[in-house]
Image (spheres, helix red, strand yellow):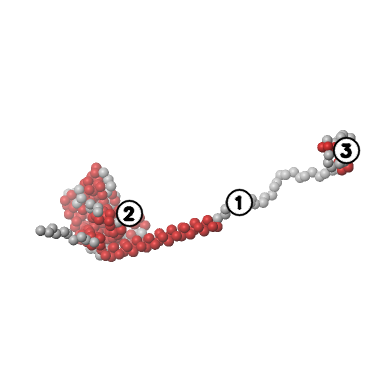
């Protein structure tokens, strides 16, 4: 009796299967973190593009979905989005008043508290898994979860019950019309972006090499001290005017002119 083997998926097929399984729910979860529909979609797509770049590593990960989720959350919670013009204006809030109150309560939490609450009460991870994904210790994650629940309950009292909070988080994420692009589009866009940045890096490297070569050819081979600018010298006494020679000086000058210019007499002249 022959033993049947499961068909082996190509990398494209495996990636598309992971995307189809995780992307829709992940976009909704990321919306709970940011309150922005377009940013949630962008964060998930960037996370899957990063996963496609490292697909051999991600495919062997024990939890590929968790790898993509952590990457998407990191991108979505980046503080740099506040400097982008498209993210400076608030998006329309949910139409339902209860959903709007819950979203406002979430967005008032610190990002680390919000992420912990969404992972534990929204996604359904246990406390050690939540701590690992948020890069915190288990006691620290438990403290963040407790304070986040208290803050939400202070603004929406009916959500003091964790079961009610979980149900409302699921409803809030599900009622929003959030979409994710097709996996083929995500892969193609990521590959084009990789090609662009690779070419940009090559061009930048060539420019640096060219500038370095030009500098080596045109740079001086030795140091030349700069010439100081001319300045007027003040305070030097004027040279004294020469007066007439005395009789003794005239006699010595005549003797020097008439005596021999060489010889011992010149080195040791006789007095007289």
Residue 8 x, y percent position in the rendering? 20, 60
* Residue at screen point 81% across, 45% down: 241
Q: Earlier in the sequence, mark 1 or mark 2?
A: 2
- For the question of whether residue 24 can be seen, the reply is no
Residue 29 x, y percent position in the rendering? 24, 56
* Residue at screen point 13% across, 58% down: 3
Q: Using a 10 Å C-alpha cutoff, classify the residue at mark 1 as few (fewer than 14 neighbours), some (14 to 19) or many (20 or more).
A: few
* Residue at screen point 30% across, 53% down: 74
Q: Are marks 1 and 2 in contact (CB under 8 Å)?
A: no
- From the image, tell me which residue sits under label 3: 248
Left or right: 44 as drawn, with respect to 162: right
- From the image, tell me which residue sits under label 2: 78
Q: Earlier in the sequence, mark 3 or mark 2?
A: 2
State the CA–CA distance, disc 1 to disc 3.
Answer: 53 Å
* Residue at screen point 87% across, 39% down: 252
Residue at the left extreme? 1
Q: Marks 3 and 2: which is nearer the front?
A: 3
Provide the secondary structure element on which disc 1 rests.
loop
Q: Earlier in the sequence, mark 1 or mark 3?
A: 1
State the CA–CA distance, disc 3 to disc 2.
Answer: 100 Å
Q: Using a 10 Å C-alpha cutoff, classify the residue at mark 3 as few (fewer than 14 neighbours), some (14 to 19) or many (20 or more).
A: few
Foreground: 47 or 148? Answer: 47
Residue 225 x, y percent position in the rendering? 61, 50
Q: Which mark is residue 224?
A: 1
Q: Using a 10 Å C-alpha cutoff, classify the residue at mark 2 as few (fewer than 14 neighbours), some (14 to 19) or many (20 or more).
A: few
Q: Marks 1 and 2: which is nearer the front?
A: 1
Give the answer, above or below, for where 253 lies relative to 179: above
């Amino acid at each position: 009796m022959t033993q049947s083997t499961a068909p082996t998926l190509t990398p494209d097929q495996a990636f598309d299967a992971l995307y189809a399984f995780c992307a829709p729910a992940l976009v909704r979860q990321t919306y709970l973190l940011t309150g922005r529909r377009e940013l949630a979609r962008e964060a998930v797509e960037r996370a899957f593009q990063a996963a496609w770049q490292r697909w051999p590593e991600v495919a062997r990960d024990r939890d590929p979905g968790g790898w993509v989720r952590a990457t998407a959350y990191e991108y979505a919670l980046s503080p740099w989005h506040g400097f982008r013009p498209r993210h400076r204006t608030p998006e329309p809030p949910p139409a339902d008043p209860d959903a709007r109150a819950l979203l406002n309560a979430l967005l008032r939490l610190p990002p680390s508290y919000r992420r912990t609450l969404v992972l534990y009460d929204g996604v359904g991870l246990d406390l050690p898994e939540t701590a690992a994904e948020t890069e915190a210790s288990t006691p620290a994650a438990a403290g963040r979860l407790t304070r986040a629940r208290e803050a939400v309950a202070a603004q929406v009292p009916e959500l003091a019950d964790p079961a009610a909070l979980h149900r409302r988080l699921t409803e809030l994420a599900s009622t929003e019309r959030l979409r994710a692009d097709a996996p083929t589009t995500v892969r193609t866009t990521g590959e084009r972006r990789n090609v662009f940045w690779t070419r940009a890096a090559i061009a930048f490297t060539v420019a640096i090499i060219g500038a370095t070569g030009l500098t080596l050819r045109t740079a001086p081979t030795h140091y030349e001290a700069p010439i100081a600018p001319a300045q007027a010298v003040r305070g030097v006494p004027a040279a004294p005017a020469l007066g007439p020679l005395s009789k003794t000086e005239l006699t010595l000058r005549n003797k020097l002119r008439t005596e021999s210019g060489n010889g011992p007499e010149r080195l040791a002249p006789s007095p007289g």
